[in-house]
Image (cartoon, grey):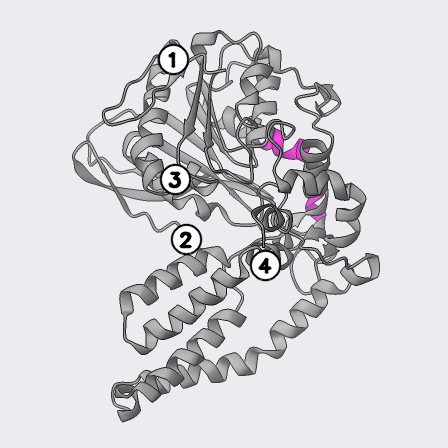
Amino acid sequence: MSRNRQARRMAIGEFGGSGETEFGLYGTLPLYMMYEASHAALNPARTMAEATKLYFRNPINPWSHTALGRSWAAAAEVFERTTRRYGKPSFDLPTTLSHGRSVPITERIVWSRPFCKLIHFEKSWGGDSHRQPKLLIVAPMSGHFATLLRGTVEAMLPDHDVYITDWTDARLVPTAEGEFTLDDYIDYVISILHKLGPDTHVMAVCQPAVPVFAAVARMEEDRDPYAPRSMILMGGPIDTRENPTGVNDLAEERGIDWFRRNVITTVPFPHPGFMRPVYPGFLQLTGFVSMNLDRHMSAHRDFFHHLVANDGDSAEKHRDFYDEYLAVMDLTAEFYLQTVDAVFIKHALPKGEMTHRGRLIRPEAITSTALMTIEGENDDISGVGQTRAAHKLCSRLAPEKKVHWLQPKVGHYGVFNGSRFRSEIVPRITQFILSNEGARPTAKVVKLAGAKSRIKGGGA
């Protein structure tokens, strides 16, 4: 399958894929109930598989020391893991290395709304005082949980006071709490920035680049004293007309009515969000997996062989990855459809047509908040140039307050995770944030030892 074809079968940006199947109105309405029924029907088989695994792994059992016994145990575990529903993972970041010592971390919820909680990774300095730049990471609300950015958080913790948005699975929010729209998303970002204060730096990873940009533009236009000192946009779809990918083409080709007919369903009883219209996580997961089905099948085959061979380290790496990858959440239908329509079909922000609560978003109002954009050279979801387009929109922002970085040899996920992110991107973000601390000084040219390129102020 060609790369472009693969991209067309997956998500809209970071929004999970609907694949090529057209369910139609009468197909999607009972779809969630069918999924729940099939999951429940497999409960006895999963219970039997778990018992089989424990029986053939018990060291008292002689079969556990044979290849046949290990094969039975491995087959049982593979079956149980591929048919279970994965719960929300934890960040599990108990410590960080900062100022040359191990510092304990405590997760605290410091702000809460029906569709989001704000987590603070609070450092315990043991009586010492260490002021660090305050960083708000806005996680994608696009199928996976905020823990997908565990590596991002872990890399930023040593030198920053980190907060992250923890979006709520829509099937857990009662309909009495009302809708959650793109306007609500922008409201939440503004409210969180008010909670954190005027000395905050905000980082938007992938999908939230557009609503975060809109929130900052609104705050700047209103001369809001809580507007952030700087804004870092990473692999986000600011203008999908720039170097469009197969993902972007799919949105324009299908149109918003196709998505409404084929990927929207309602939450069934007995979930708290009963009767809430959603884009369900299991449909998104279908898109994620179908994009690289051969690779996932090979990974599970290798997992089986690792278990039989008692290769515990390789098996544990598989478990860790798929515990995160297969954990998905539902999105409210109104937020998903509005985002697809505004960002990927109408290109409302770069055309100057995006509104928030009836007011036009004016990017030229951004004059104080410094801007950094980061892209991956091999990104096939947010094409090169789509995030950098934010610089052109901020026409009145001083050139020295603009920074752009194109990271060589990374794809979409390499923009915010992995070895190159930690070694080449994080130092540049840290320097950019530090250069905009205090009285909002301008961004500086930064040279890093061993780097092939450099950050330049006025990267637009």
Please determine whether, in this image, residue 20 is positioned above or below residue 100. Answer: below
* Residue 326 magenta-highlighted: no
Where's residue 232, x and y in %? 46, 25
- Label 2: element kind: loop
Please determine whether, in this image, residue 305 is positioned above or below residue 181. Answer: below
First in sequence, mark 3 or 1: give its number: 3
| Rendered residue at 81%/57% (across/down) | 24
First in sequence, mark 1 or 4: give its number: 4
- Label 4: element kind: helix
Amino acid type at mark 4: Ser
- Label 1: element kind: loop
| Front tag of 4 and 3 | 4
| Front tag of 1 and 4 | 4
Residue picked out by circle 4? 290
Query: Start and end of the magenta stretch?
Result: 176-188
Res. 460 visible in picture:
yes
First in sequence, mark 3 or 2: give its number: 2
| Rendered residue at 79%/62% (across/down) | 27
Residue picked out by circle 1? 443
Asked if labels 1 and 3 touch by Cβ distance under 8 angstroms, the answer is no
